[in-house]
Amino acid sequence: MRTALVQFNPTVGDIAANAARMAALADQARQDGAELVVFPELAICGYPPRDLLLHEGFVAACAAAAKALGEHHSGGTTLVFGCPLPVDRDHPGRGTANSLLAYAEGKLLDYYDKRLLPTYDVFDEDRYFEPGTRAVVIRVPAECGVRHVGLTICEDLWRGEDAGFASRYLRDPDPVAELVAAGAEVIISPSASPFVLGKGRKHRAILTSHATRHNVFIAAVNQVGGNDDLVFDGHAAVYDPNGRAVAFGPGFTEAIVMVGIPPRESPEPSGEAPADPLLSTPDEELLHNALVLGTRDYLHKTGHKRALIGLSGGIDSAITCAIAVAALGRDNVLGVAMPGKYSSEHSLTDAFDLAARLGIRCVRTPIAGAFDGFRGAIDPTFEELGELTLGSKLPDVTEENLQSRARGTILMTISNRTGALVLTTGNKSELAVGYCTLYGDMNGGLAVLSDVTKIQVYRLAKWMNTHPDRAGFEGPPIPESTIIKPPSAELAPNQTDQDSLPAYEILDEIVARYVEHKQSLHHIAEDTGFDPALVARIARLIDLSEYKRKQAAVGIKVTSVAFGSGRRVPIAQRWRSP
């Protein structure tokens, strides 16, 4: 059975454009000989549609577009794609299902409603959907004979095992087992599963397990592209009943993955299985590709063409700028170097060296005049209030923040005039403990590195410089001096990050355990051997900085727990971990 798995990049809510693109891809797949064409979960509207599903007319518009697509573009093939649909077609107000539609020769064969609805991390499907109650197996005509194809959607296959939430479904029927009992010999799984470092390998193991346990072919296809804070990586895959790889799709790009699925009883194919690009790609490259795709799609899907970045000569702004150039092209990225009274000479040198390596324009805009202007306005007020003036104790936190806010104001002003979107440069380690200035370096429309720890930033820099061709550059993009010098905000004389923070190897370990794994302070100190007082101080900083993160720019999620829609911690709360 010639099967086309379509790694499709939809724009959420752009129903007409999504349907038109799907029609073109379906026609292409049919012309290439496909007998079955499969698109991802909720392809018609894009995932996640979130509260758009609650807007009057949205689900009806999706259903109308789906009907037109199926009736006019399924001739000569079986077409399967995702779409939200009313549970009761005659009474739309009775709920919505996350559905698959199967069309052939312009007629609806059947539909399937997703049965397991994830409600954890970034998922909130119980808020929007009613679960399905039946297993659906469709008959697909093929040159090798009629094939019985079972329909699942995303979580029906993963059952929370990929994200550590398998216990949620212990009392639920297994959709895969029911499909096998109903006669399915091939099971397809259209998904919209967000990229997370390490999750792809878990998906491969789950696919292999289903194929061998149930003696069926498993064909999975994921959405691709960036939608707000989420990135979807494609990486379609097909496994035979022996758990042998049949085909794999590329990562982070639209593609039609064509594969011939033989009868289940056919002899085992000879030769080596195709190489899995997901398993052979190092984490740094996966991370780079996810950030590039997330940045490109966030700007393009929000109507922006250009990006603007404050270049400090530091590692974070360098990596953010390199990601932006890989995503948007050198002509669409502008760097701004903003030296202040405590800026070192190498900060400017490194900033312009980076710009030259990347081939972007970089302008120099000193902040001294803006800073003095702010002081001239605020010092008399402080004197009237009887507070210490900025000049009475140099440098203090107020002065440091004022420098950062002067830079933030300059960047936003340039953004207003040019239309370029400001990319913030702070990493996850800094955002965790509040080592950032609200309305200063946190100004911007997208926080590219907000889910990337400092240690990961350095690893990414070294990977880029070692493999510039795979990162999209002609030569090493990051100046070596930027990589080797001690990190510093340069807001005070001879300042380094470690003046107020522990070494990043220690900080990142505490952040991972406290934020991602939610360990108690006692267990963190016990497991790592770190000073309990240090662990308690870092955890306290994380808790106190929640108000900053709630006002931060949207960030690209690449780990199991990001500071975004999947983490819901109150700001005003008094729980203290033991």
Image: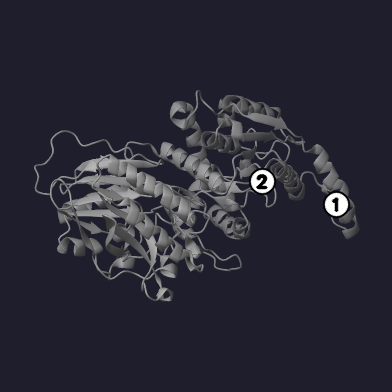
Asked if residue 140 lies left or right of residue 434, the reply is left
Percent position (x, y) of residue 199? 36, 49
Residue wearing tag 2: 441
Type of amino acid at the residue the image marks with label 1: Ile
Q: Residue at point 62% right, 41% down?
A: 497
- Give the crowd class for mark 1: few <14, some 14-19, many >=20 residues within 10 Å: few
Against 266, residue 87 (above or below) is below
Q: Is residue 33 visible?
A: yes
Local secondary structure at mark 1 = helix
Q: Residue at point 48% right, 42% down?
A: 293
Q: How is the image coloured?
A: one colour
Type of amino acid at the residue the image marks with label 2: Asp
Distance between the alpha carbons at the discs numbered 1 and 2:
20 Å
Q: Is residue 234 visible?
A: no
Asked if residue 51 lies left or right of residue 178, the reply is right
Which residue is at the front of the view, 107 or 79? 107
Which residue is at the front of the view, 106 or 284? 106
Quarter where residue 42 is shown: bottom left
Residue wearing tag 1: 378
Asked if residue 554 lies left or right of residue 175, the reply is right
